[in-house]
Image: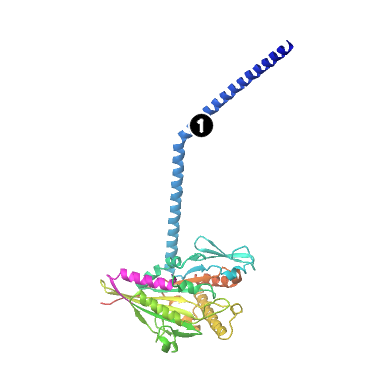
Amino acid sequence: MQAFGAACDEFTTDVSSLQSLHKEVGKLRQTQKEARSDCDTQLRYITDRFPILKERIESMLMEIEHLETKHREIGEERKKLHNLVLELKGNIRVFVRVRPLWEREKALETSDTPTTSFTEDCKLGIWSEEQARKKWFEFDACFNPKSTNEGVFEEVKMLATSVLDGYNVCIFAYGQTGSGKTYTMSGIPKDPGLNVRTLRELFKIKEARSKDIDCKMTIMVTEIYNEMIKDLLGGKTTMSKKLDVKMNADGSATVPGLTEIPVDTVEEVLKCMEDAQANRTVMQTDMNDESSRSHSIVQVKTVCKHFKDKKELTGKINLIDLAGSENTNKSGVTGVGMKEAQNINKSLSALGDVISSLVSKSSHIPYRNSKLTMMLKDSLGGDSKTLMIVQASPAQCNVTETLSSLNFASRARNVELGKAKKNVKSTE
């Protein structure tokens, strides 16, 4: 009997526990039902609100796109106004291009701070480890080490149109030895420089206007080596001929006796450029495997006669690859190389004196101090549209030379030439 009573008590306890659990399950089911109902209500609210949110998001995206378009338009307008001011004042336009860092230079870099930094498309910062500060420059355009010759040309090609419109144009590259001037101006076969691209553009425009004008072109290529002018297209007989610069009454400079070759096709131009490049003076230095030891000047003249109004437009473009300014301690040159470097630095110093005199609007401009400045007279002090491309190294070991080049470029940018004039006359 006692065992039966104990079993009954245990059974009663289990039933009580089951009843308690059943009530707890009931409460949980009720909570779940309320939670599901609440979720359904929230989902319905979000679903009802979604079209409004979607509409607002689309509106915001459209507004962002509108603001970005407006920003681009304002940027383009600012650039046009800037160019218009430069055109009216006749300022020398200045571009800066920084070449990539060479492998042998990477091993010499000791600072985590890059030497060059860019902001917008016209500002360049130069960090000097020695001075422990960064100096900022602003130019008409700045090209970083990833830039291409094609990209640089896109900013230049409008000047090619100016030549066929009867204007004088001058594009020259400036910078220390090994900074990339010849690559920008001459390029390589698979990536042509400004010389080839500009001349191709001239022929492209000439072809497009062939129904309206008859255009004749001639090309001359010279180098100034050790203050001597050498004809690079006349063969061996003219290479040794003594040539000199003659200053004309109108302020322009000519070199009597230079070989002037008529060209009718791009292929003929490229052949002339190839022959001239083969005759140019270069040598290997510690700074550059193929250092240009002379200033190279490619000059193309155009005479365009209009069929309708019988007007004749005469244009000229000078494409100039200057020899690099040189620190002889770094380049390691001796003997003939030392003499070349001294003459290069002397002519570039004369160019700096001319720029300084033009900026200060001095009554006397020392063009006659160098063959180079005499040949550049009508580009620097005349009615030419002039563009200076400053090449710079991104290496900290060259920061002194880089700052020197950019300071020079900043002064050059302040030179006011006056509004360029169109060379036009009637042939009636």
103 w.r.t. 226: above or below: above
Q: Is residue 306 left or right of residue 323?
A: left
Q: Is residue 43 left or right of residue 423?
A: right
The magenta-colored residue range is 191-216
Q: Which residue is mark 1?
A: 42
Q: Position of residue 363 (x, y in %)?
A: 49, 78
Q: Is residue 298 left or right of residue 208?
A: right
- Which of these two is toward me, 281 or 26? 26
Q: Amino acid at mark 1?
A: Gln
Q: Magenta segment: does it hold 205? A: yes
Quarter holding the C terminus is bottom left
Q: Residue at x 45, y 85 (%)?
A: 230
- Judged from the image, the secondary structure of the residue bearing numbered disc 1 is helix
1 w.r.t. 124: above or below: above
Picture quadrant where residue 213 is located: bottom left
| Residue 376 seen | no
